[in-house]
Amino acid sequence: MREIEALPKVELHVHLEGSMPPETLLDLANRNEVSLPFTTVDEALAWYEFRDFPHFAEVYSTISRCIVTADDVERLARDFIRGQAEQNILHTEITFTAFTHFKNHGLAFGDQVAALRCAREWAERELDVSFGVIVDIPRDHANTEQSEMIARWVRDVVVDDPEGPVIALGLGGYEVGHLPAEFKSSFDIVREAGVPAVCHAGETEGPASISGALDLLGSLRIGHGVRCLEDDALTNRLRDEQIVLEVCPSSNVCLGVFNDIESHPLPELRRRGLAVTINSDDPAMFGTSMTHELEIAHKVFGMSMDDLKETMVLAARSTLLPQAKQQRLIDRVSR
């Protein structure tokens, strides 16, 4: 376990809002006069504990209501990345739902990006770690007009500042009833400008969602993708093209995709030759961390330290960093 803790790490799939430490939540709620169903850190931890999807949605909504200002965004990003650095996570690609804070409190996208830029500069200077931000479309909360607006936000900020904190357009939220075809026009906006796309697919929906994310939205990686095994042709395609899957074992069990951790198909995905990375998704809400997910991979799935090291190098090679920065990260992880 000490070796796993010390292992240099890269995380590709983690939500900023779903990573809010309880101390940060209490502070932001007090500052912004948001009522919470608890008053202490211990009570917050008990409230965070996953029960079912409606409770998960309630927790996520409450967290989002506490993010009111650009300073709140910067505070959250700093607290989160400090926790990543404590796990020796050298680079993180964070999913962030900027639209929610715009919709809830009118927080301008440009102000949110400026806050993330300040947090990233601080992390690089003080902690020697980096992060990039995938701004996602919440598929179950944004209509076509709103989705296209988000896409234009991302396109404009990436084109204007290609080495800034925003690195891609994502697609998150609840998959059922919201398949990729619904969002093609939005992803066309960023594709035409050469801006990357990274989409969630194949978690609560099956193989068709994954194929749609690849073929209609141009997704470079697949967030989750675990249900690809229901379609041999798709599984073989993912293997042949080495399309990276951002696998989040504890999250999949909490959300009922699989009954228990022993039933999770991570070993089968690896046996089939797929490019698999390991991630925490919403660590505060699922009672996990990147380090804990690697411990599960070792203890439950039998992955050796060499396997885990290879997985971290794969994650480093799969980042959206500029080439020179990516190579430096690969070198750091490899050493």
Image: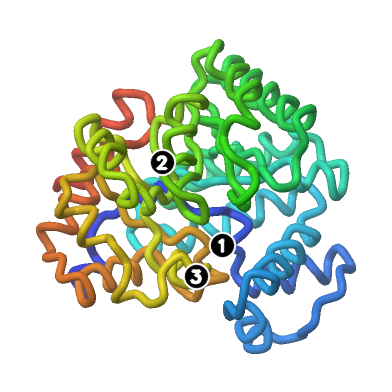
On the image, numbered disc 2 is attached to which residue? 222
- The answer to whether the residue labelled 1 contacts the one labelled 3, judged by CB atoms less than 8 Å apart, is no
Disc number lying in front (1 or 3): 3
13 left or right of 34?
left
- Amino acid carrying label 3: it is Gly
The N terminus: image quadrant: bottom left
Q: SS for tag 1? A: helix
Q: Residue 92 location in percent, x, y?
A: 42, 47
Q: Which residue is mark 1?
A: 19
- Which of the two residues, 185 or 88, is positioned nearer the viewer here? 185
Q: Answer whether residue 8 is visible to the viewer in this image.
A: yes
Amino acid under label 1? Ser
Q: Residue at x 27, y 49 (%)?
A: 276
- Secondary structure at badge 2 equals strand
Q: Vertical placement of 154 versus 204: above or below?
A: above
Amino acid identity at mark 2: Ile
Task: Name the image quarter holding residue 34.
Answer: bottom right
Instruction: Tell me which label, 2 or 3, sits earlier in the chain.
Output: 2
Does the image show residue 128?
Answer: no
Say whether residue 190 is left or right of residue 211.
Answer: right
Is the residue under label 3 in contact with that under label 2 (CB below 8 Å)?
Answer: no
Q: Which residue carries the number 3 mark?
A: 256
